[in-house]
Amino acid sequence: MTRPPFVISIQSQVVFGHVGNSAAVFPMQAAGLEVASIPTVVFSNTPDYPTLRGRALPPEFFSDLLHGARERGLPERAAFIVTGYIGSLDVALMVADFVAEAMTANPEITYLCDPVMGDAGPGLYVPEAIADVMRERLLPMADIATPNPFELSWLTGREIVTVADLEAARQVLRIAADARLIATGCTLEDTPDGHIESVILGSDGISRHPTPHLPIALPGTGDLFAGLIVAGLGHGLALTRAVETAQVLTSRALGHASALGAGEVVLSEQEFRRALLTLGPGRDGR
């Protein structure tokens, strides 16, 4: 019997709600992937509530978790590594070292770097030193990078208004020539009215993927989206198809959260969960 694809997911975790690993791990597991989740921070909830408890993992504790992952041979087993929000510089540097070691030990691994560092509303919400580690250490190793327009603009010093701006930013961003950049949540000059789009830029060209724009901004949306992309790739979907599927399912989760009056993404809607169980390429192999 063939074992399912194995994912190492290194990002935040919350006790209540869905953000970071608490948003991304369930969809990957529901889609049939095996996931090892390593928290970079553990908080009681997202920062959108009146109080916030918890903290970034102490460096020695986080290092011990990584050591245990090495002892279990997880880097050699993994088909994917995902990194997201990181709450301290020491942890960021250890994540970079771990990803580099994993990619050396397992050249077949696919690394998705979600440089979670800010957004148009709040601006940069990690220390610049952590953002610098993402730019200088993590993104250059990435096979797939998923910044939003604010993050891409901050990382490259370029305003993102047109597809040409995205192309120019990709040239500045320190990612490999064969890596694929997915600019998420874009509203460009020629984006269709009432839509938002993901734009994939790679060595084989550009593809644009508009989807209806829901007037809903909730914590955990980007983390869920990245997890859904990996879920699709783990089932053999082409990247374009994985992105489109992730858009549809993320919209379902947002719509359900809005209907419930929830303050963050909700993962319990029946059709959302059913779709995860049936992920896979169609008859055309997409």
Image (tube, rainbow, N blue to C red):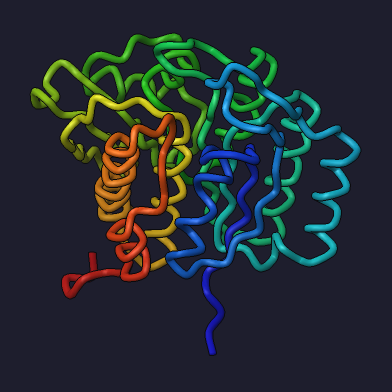
Determine whether, in the image, residue 104 is placed left or right of residue 171.
right
Q: Is residue 185 left or right of residue 44?
A: left
Q: Position of residue 74 (x, y in %)?
A: 72, 63
Which quarter of the figure is the N terminus placed in? bottom right
- Left or right relative to 118: residue 205: left
Image-quadrant location for residue 133: top right
Name the foreground residue: 274 vs 279. 274
Q: Position of residue 174 (x, y in %)?
A: 52, 27
- Residue at the outermost left position: 193
Residue positioned 72% across, 26% down in the render: 53
Query: Residue 267: x percent and y percent?
Result: 41, 50
Q: From this view, report whether residue 65 is shown above or below residue 140.
A: below
- Which residue is most to the bottom? 1
**In the displayed structure, does residue 110 sit left or right of residue 214?**
right
Pick the residue in front: 141 or 56.
56
User: Does residue 13 appear anywhere in the picture?
Assistant: no
- Give the residue displayed 17% in from the left and 75% down from the top: 283
Q: Residue furthest front?
A: 260
